[in-house]
């Protein structure tokens, strides 16, 4: 694959799962887990895109909960949080190999 010649439509997800802005992180994490995706579009009541929630957003929020707001998130804390959030993706990838 050549990135300069590959079109988005060749790689994009066609069966897009969405969530609402008032859904819980737990519900959206379940969508990510069940559909093995790293981000979920957030839509309003009319189905219009209002944002995107990513694994990165969840990991950063989890890190903020465990680190006092007066300190920066350490690379170690972020790495541990990201690994926990993404753990299922590694397990699935290893199983598929």
Image: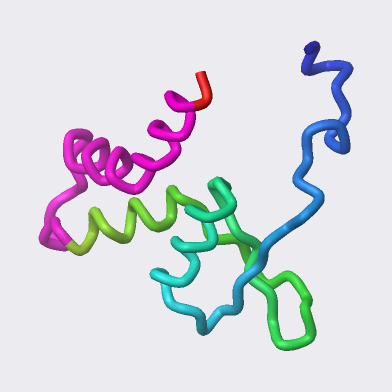
Q: In this view, does 4 lie above or below 90?
A: above
Count up the numbered dots: 0
Where, quadrant-wise, is the N terminus in this rendering? Answer: top right
Q: Which residue shows up at 69% across the image and 82% down it?
A: 44
In the image, which residues are magenta? 66-95
Q: Is residue 56 above or below residue 65?
A: above
In which quadrant of the rendered view does residue 69 lie? Answer: bottom left
Left or right of 11, for residue 96: left
Left or right of 97, for residue 40: right
**Residue 41 point in image, percent of width and height:** 65, 63
Q: Is residue 93 above or below residue 53?
A: above
Closer to the camera in the image, 50 or 33:
33
Left or right of 69, for residue 28: right
Q: Residue furthest front?
A: 95
In which quadrant of the rendered view does residue 76 lie? Answer: top left
In which quadrant of the rendered view does residue 75 lie? Answer: top left
């Amino acid at each position: 694959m050549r990135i300069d010649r590959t079109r988005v439509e060749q790689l994009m997800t066609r069966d897009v799962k969405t969530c609402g802005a008032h859904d819980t992180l737990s519900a959206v994490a379940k969508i990510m887990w069940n559909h093995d995706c790293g981000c979920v579009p957030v839509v309003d009541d009319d189905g219009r895109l209002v944002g995107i929630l990513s694994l990165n957003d969840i990991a950063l929020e989890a890190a903020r909960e465990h680190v006092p707001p007066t300190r920066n998130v350490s690379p170690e804390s972020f790495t541990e949080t990201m690994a926990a959030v993404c753990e299922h993706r590694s397990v699935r990838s290893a199983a598929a190999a």
